[in-house]
Image (cartoon, rainbow, N blue to C red):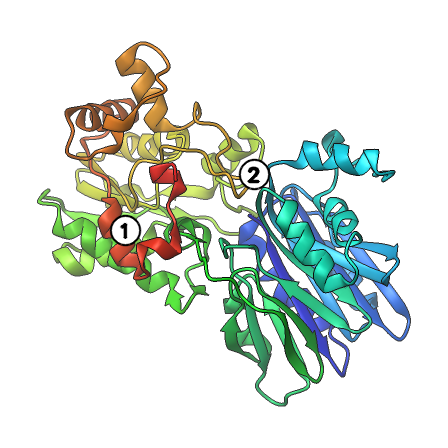
Amino acid sequence: MGGLFGVVSTTDCVHALFYGTDYHSHLGTENGGMAVWGPQGFQKAIHSISQAQFKSRFVDDYKKMQGLFGIGAIDDETPQPLIFRSKFGVYAVAVSGLITNKDKLVNELLNDGASFGESSGGTVNNAEIAAYLINRGDNIVEGIASMRAVVEGSICALVLTPDGIYAARDKVGRFPLALGKSKDDNKSYVVATEASSFENLGYELERFLGPGEIALLTPDGIKQMKPAGAEKKICSFLWIYTGSPTSIYEGVAVESARERCGRYLARRDNVQADFVSGVPDSGVGHAIGYAMESGIPYRRPLVKYTPGYGRSYTPPAQEIRDLVATMKLIAVRDVIKGNRMIICDDSIVRGTQLKNYTIKKLWENGAKEIHIRPACPPLMFPCLYSSSTRTTAELASHKAIRALEGKEVKNFKEYLDPASAKYAKMVDWIRGDLGVTTLKYMTIEDMIAAIGLPADELCLHCWLGK
C-alpha cells in the first residue's frame, strides 16, 4: 500500500517530516524518501529500507536537510519522492497505491515523446508516470484530476511546490489522507496516510480528505482546490490488518474495530479453550475482543521480537517473507504446553506462514489444541488496488478449491456462500492443510458491522469480487 506524509510550516519542517514519515514504516519495507523545499530550493533523499529501519537510514539526511515544506514516502514498489522541472516550475511528487494499467500508460506516454529512467527490476517509477500525466493539465490541480481519471487501480498523491503541498486522495477514497494542524499555532499543517502520526508531533486531526478531493496546504491554512466526489469505497482491510492499532480512518479507530471483530467471533463460537491469543501484532486486538466477550483469559504463547523485524506480509519476495515470519515470533513454551488455545489472526492469505511459522511452533512446544479464528472471511479475489495479493492462485481458498475440484474452476460462486456445503468443505480442507483442531472464519456481515461503516462505503472486493 505505502504511506505518505507532508508538512508545511513557517519554520524548519524537517523534524516533523522525518518522524512523521517514519510513523508510516508499517506500510512498506522496501523504499523510503523525503523531499523538502525552502530558501535553498529543493532537496531530496531516497534510500532502501529493506535491510534497515527508516530512522537509521535517514538520520544523516535529517541532520543536513532544511526546508519549510516537505513530503515523505514509504513504498514497496517506487523509490520516491522525485523532483521534476516542468511547465509549472519545479516540484516534487510522491504517490501511493497501485496503477494496474501501468504498461498501457507507459506506452502512451512513450508515443507522446516521454522518456523514463529505469527503476530497479526494469519497471517505470510510479511517481514518474504520475508526473508526466500531471504535466498534461493546464495547471497542477487539473493535471492531478486528469491523471487520476486515466489511472486504473488507485492512486493518492502529494505534490510539493514553492506554493505549498497539493494533497490528492484517490477517486473513490480506497486509501486515506488525513489533514491536521499544529496544536500550538495555526502556521503549520500536515497531511498523512496515517492520522496517528500527528499526536506525538504536536498536531491534531482536522478531517479526512474526501474521495477524489484535492487540497492545497500552505502556512496560511488548507484550501480546497477540488471538492470530494459522492462515491466512497474505502479499503476494509485497513481495519482488519493494514492499519496500525493506533490508526483511525473515517472516524473509526482500528483498535476498537478489531476488538469488535473479536467480540463477533466469540458470539458465534462455542469452543472450549484454556486461553485466547492473537498472532502478533495485528491479531492481538481481535483476540482481546474475543477474550472480553467470551470471558476466556488472554495469554501470550507467541511474542514478537520487535527490533529489526517488520511485517511478514508486506515484503515482495517470498523468501524475505519467510525469513521475517521465522525470526520475528518466539514461542513461550511454559504458556503453550498442555493447553487448548484459540488463536485469532487478521486473515489467512496464502496460509504458508501461519502453517509453517506459527502453528508449527505451537505444536512443537506442546499445544494440546489449536483453534484458528481469522477476523475476516476467506480471501477469494486478489487486490486490484494495492500491491498485496496479486493472483488468485496464491490464495489459500483457491488452493483448497483446486484440491477439491481437481482443476481450476472459473465459477466458484458456491464457495462464497458460508451456508453451502462447498464452503464447508473448502474451510475444512484449509483446516487440514494448516494442521489445526478447528477453523472458523468471520462472516462478511459481522466484519462490516465491526468496522461500523455502511457496506456501500467499503471496498469488499477481496471477499466478494466486486
For residue 331, the mark is none
Examine the image and state in which quarter residue 352 appears: top left
| Element type at mark 1 | helix
Residue 25: percent from left, percent from top: 58, 54
Q: Is residue 288 visible?
A: no
Residue furthest toward the bottom?
Answer: 185
Q: Dot 2 corresponds to which residue?
A: 315
Mark 1 highlights which residue?
Answer: 447
Nearest to N terminus: mark 1 or mark 2? 2
Q: Residue furthest top?
A: 406
Percent position (x, y) of residue 460? 37, 45
Q: Secondary structure at mark 2?
A: loop
Image quadrant where one finds the C terminus: top left
Q: Looking at the image, which residue sits at the far front?
A: 138
As shown in the figure, which amino acid type bears the numbered disc 2? Pro
Q: Which residue is depicted at the point 44% across and 57% down? A: 232
Looking at the picture, how far across and down is residue 394, in whole percent? 44, 25
